[in-house]
Amino acid sequence: MSSNTTPKKIETVEFGLMSPQEYREMSVTKIITADTYDDDGFPIDMGLMDPRLGVIDPGLQCKTCGKRSGQCEGHFGHIELAAPVVHPGFSKLIRRLLRGTCHECARLLLSPTQKEKYRNKLETARELDEDLDKITKAAIREARKNSTCPHCDAEQKDVKHDKPTTYYEDGQKLMPSDIRDRFERIPDEDLEPLGIDPERTRPEWMILTVLPVPPVTARPSITLDSGQRSEDDLTHKMVDIIRINQRFMENREAGSPQLIIEDLWELLQYHVTTFMDNEISGTPPAHHRSGRPLKTLSQRLKGKEGRFRGSLSGKRVNYSSRTVISPDPTLSVNEIGVPEQIAKEMTQKVKITRNNIDEIVEYVRRGPNTHPGANYVKRADGRRLKVKDLNSEQLAERILEENEDGEPQGLGWTVERHLTDGDVVLFNRQPSLHRMSMMAHEVVVMPYKTFRLNTTVCPPYNADFDGDEMNMHVVQSEEALAEADVLMKVQEHILSPRFGGPIIGAIQDHISGTYLLTNEEHRFEEATVLDLLRQTSINDLPEPAGEDEDGVYWTGKEVFSVLLPESLDLSFESNSGEAVVIEDGELIEGTIDEMAVGSFVGEIVETIAKVYDNERARRFIDDVSGLAVRSIMHFGFSFGISDEDLPQEARDEIDDAIVESEEEVERLIETYERGELESLPGRTLEETLEMKIMQALGQARDEAGEIAEQYLDEDNPGVVMADSGARGSMLNLTQMAGCVGQQAVRGERINRGYENRTLSHFKPDDLSADARGFVRHSYKEGLNPKEFFFHAMGGREGLVDTAVRTSKSGYLQRRLINALQELEAQYDGTVRNAQDDIVQFEYGEDGVDPMKMPKEDTLDVDAIVDRVLDAEFEDERAKAEFAGDD
Amino acid sequence: MNLEEKLEKTELPDRIQEEIEDAVEGRDLTDEEFEEVVEAVRDRYEETRIDPLEPVGTVSAQSIGEPGTQMTMNTFHYAGVAEIDVTQGLPRLIELVDARKEPDTPMMTVHLEDEYATDREKAREVVWKIEATKILSIGDISIDVASMEVSVDLDPEMLEERNLEVSEIAEKIDDELGIEVSEGESSVSFGPSNPSYRELLQLVEELREIVFKGIEGIERVVIRKEENDEYVLYTEGSEFKKVLRVEGVDSTRTRTNNLHETYKALGIEAARNAIIDEMMSTLEEQGLEVDTRHVMLVADAMTTTGEIQSIGRHGISGSKESVLSRAAFEVTVNHLLDAAVHGEDDRLEGVTENVIVGQPIKIGTGDVELVVGKPD
């Protein structure tokens, strides 16, 4: 397509059946021989590989259209079937028609008034967009009730259907030719009440007399290394059909007995059936020589890898790359580190203009193997020239060569240059569950072979660095580039439309870092402050907080405050529940932890994104992660097995608590055995006992946790992480230092394994704690073999659960997307589907975008009223602006 | 003009009108000031409005689908009341979206009226009217093979509590099984018409199924005192329409987790709200934050036709206008064959169809057309 033609728009796709006549007209040749190639390897005329059917071998020309391989889309041929056969896809409809029409006069067995009724019903159903099938089925049902034809009074016979393609009338087999004859006689007006459009579809076309032969481009043969040709499954099936077709004709001409003819007819039917669909129940699938079932027409369309879902709804694309990801805290959130090797392979198209010609020529001159270089030059006439080391100089000169106007002739040419810093690309990680799974980043070309990304964008992608790979796409058209830049940049996605909060924010060590920095009153001298802030966008130091014997100093809170917008006022609760107060961009009180800057919950991030703008929020996130990394390095942070050490007295206390609970369990079991246990309402005795035991043992673990918490220091790295919300919880620490606790399978204590016992180490019906999966040790102490086994049981359940869940939720998501994808908000505030039907009169009842919604879920009307009443405006204009007049 | 009228005239969403009302109340604003406040509020509100052409459907689908990966598969969980198991998490969400005729674990929350809500005894009375009373909860069955008789020793206390008479029991058995029943002081006995051991056992089986009092299908009812000192009943099994008619039941607050029962009893708008409430509570219970607007859109999409449609092949996706879109979703070949017979047209209005033919889709930036023209 040359560049200045407007692409044509497809308005409608019409569906209908094709008549035998149409098949013949569109066919370029009749196919009569089952052979493909002759001894010299040339395709046989009127064979299945007839050169008129299209070209697949490179270099050859198509005999029909003259185009070459790749250009020629192929042409249909046809086979004249010796006898008509049933189209297997319509076998049910054929049955319905046979039952609903008179076997004498072929009229629909409905009176004119009944016909009218169904015609009207269908019309309303079409208007209301309802299911037509129900009405046509009802029409046939009513027709069958008439035992005599209302038109010719003929007695009706019972039609039996032997799946998939045999029909009996009154015990007599109906040959496809008989059916076809009868269908031919059904008048057009009788078809309308059945929902069949006679303009496009005549019922007799459901019985095939001519079979179209798909072009070779749809069934290319592959040449194996051995030089042998391997044909496509469809070709194999066509060969079978032609062979039987031929034998049928020969036998009929020879006047063979009816029995043999019928056998061959059935065989022909079988081959045509399996050609269309090789998975019909009741028909044995046709197999390849190797024993694998053939992939015929239906199989090509169906399913995830089928034509519709695999090749039409989703396609493979060029200008994309994939590699392992790794973290780089020095990048900004909206940047991506691209390996040089990839940057040299992936290109961006640039049109040469007077302004950029020198730069572009330099790219071309550098060739394809030196980084910022170029791979292709596209001339004005559309020829695309590959830039090689050998011709790069020459191509550069060609661009600069002057034409008759005295201008460089390369103006208007396009050059595909390497990716360079600042290019906008799309970055994606599967599974792409939400729109934040694909965002636009700016390229930073880097050495080595992995994509590098800032760790704060891990939450939206749900990425980690244990071997994850991600994809990068280079956007090619100007429109796409503009959309990527404006709509898809990372900063545009800081707030998630799911809950209107920030999905991007500090994680893990960032949070530990800010926590350490702001939790206690640290004093820093100038050099340290400079070091802490060196990776942020801050260039000026604030006033020192004070002076002590070592000179001026700054506090941690003050250092953090530098990152905040000057006018920010905010107060909220931190992760540990204490108040955090920010006034005029100064952190007055409280510790900066997960609730302040963390992903999903960070109050400061959310406020900045909503009150200021996305760009400011991006800068804040970059600054926080920069400062946090520096500060955690300043303080030093490590966590090892010795950090879970508890003093002897603590361990004794924990042991006592556990023993206490185990005794409690024993007591419960004794009460139960004595029959004195009282059941909870609506529960059996056994259930009650289990619940009470679970409770007792749960308490044991909680107590162990509390004791462990008491003995672990405030500055214990595990406690710091749990307190700040950086990683892990007190429960994790409890399990490491105190006691792992009860293991569960399906929400119950472990009760499976041997008959009446979990393991052969226990007596039957032992309900005690350790026989049912209570792990009394801590991870640090180590588990004994029995405990280890129970722990593995609980762990296994978790794994299975995850596996099942991913497939279930994946399908749920697919269905939701498919059902809702056409819904769009309109200018009038309504939500409508593709047919312009209104689904909601006002989006979300109030037309508010969840992403833009103010944080408290509502507008702060009180503040607005205060502001209006106080009227502290400089002049009338400022007031008018506030009131929203333009 | 009073405040309400003035607010009405602003044409702002109800929620915001209410907020203005609250904020302005008692401040004694002049008309002019009031106008200024309204304009300022309107300005802020306009800023938060959804952008036209935003693909809200896809965003909502993603917002509900994405947290699905984080939900538990554990089918049973306790919902408020420890005594009643209710399906939670992903299975419940799937069940809602599927618009199943009957949930896995049907249940109702029955609120009570007036004195029934405050008096435990009164509440009990309602329980007996709702809970299906079967023979095993009021007596013991014994089978005498020698005399070919089934006799039931009734517990007088239980009968008293449930306000049942021995004669009622006998009558009921007579009605249901169609046999002669002889009454004792606190027992009933009967035997099969033609004595055979099999028939005898058959009778016992049938006897167990008879509902003597209450509503069939409601297995268990639990009374619970809520925080506001109100007694609320939780039932296992759901018969919404019947329960609404029971005396003492507050029909305005009673609810069921069966969408179709809500729909049949209270209509499509109620069903829509039921979908929203059930989905939101399922998500909240799992600790997942999802904006109501997304859930509303799903509920509205499921109910726009006036009936509850499921999300998927048998519902919204299956009734789409476009052949190509349906074929690309599920049961590809059948949709194509049917389209051919019915002579359908695909007008290429939706998303999938246009992706298939390689045209820009009419959503978001694809829905805007730019006309390049010369300036006059």
Image: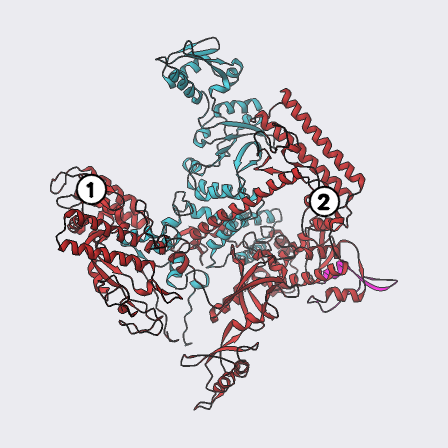
Residues at circles 1 and 2 in contact by the CB criterion of under 8 Å: no
**Residue at far right of view:** A549
Q: Which residue is mark 2?
A: A780
In the rendered image, the vertical position of residue A521 relative to residue A738, given as above or below: below
Examine the structure image and report whether residue A546 is included in the region drawn in magenta: yes
Residue A17 x %, y %: 25, 56
Residue B310 x %, y %: 42, 45
Q: Amino acid at mark 2?
A: Lys
Query: Dot 2 falls on which chain?
Result: A
In the rendered image, the vertical position of residue B76 relative to residue A620, given as above or below: above
Image quadrant holding the C terminus of chain A, namely bottom right
Image quadrant holding the N terminus of chain A, namely bottom left
| Depth order, front residue of A29/A614 | A29
| SS under mark 2 | loop
Characterize the local packing of mark 2: few (<14), some (14-19) or many (20 or more) Cα atoms within 10 angstroms. Answer: some
In the picture, one chain is red; tell me its letter.
Answer: A
| Depth order, front residue of A311/A820 | A311
- The reply to whether residue A850 is in sight is yes
> In the rendered image of this protein, which colour is used for chain B?
cyan
| Depth order, front residue of B146/A847 | B146
For image coordinates 46% across by 41% down, the residue present is B95
Magenta residues span A536-562
| SS under mark 1 | strand
Q: Amino acid at mark 1?
A: Tyr
Q: Which residue is mark 1?
A: A168
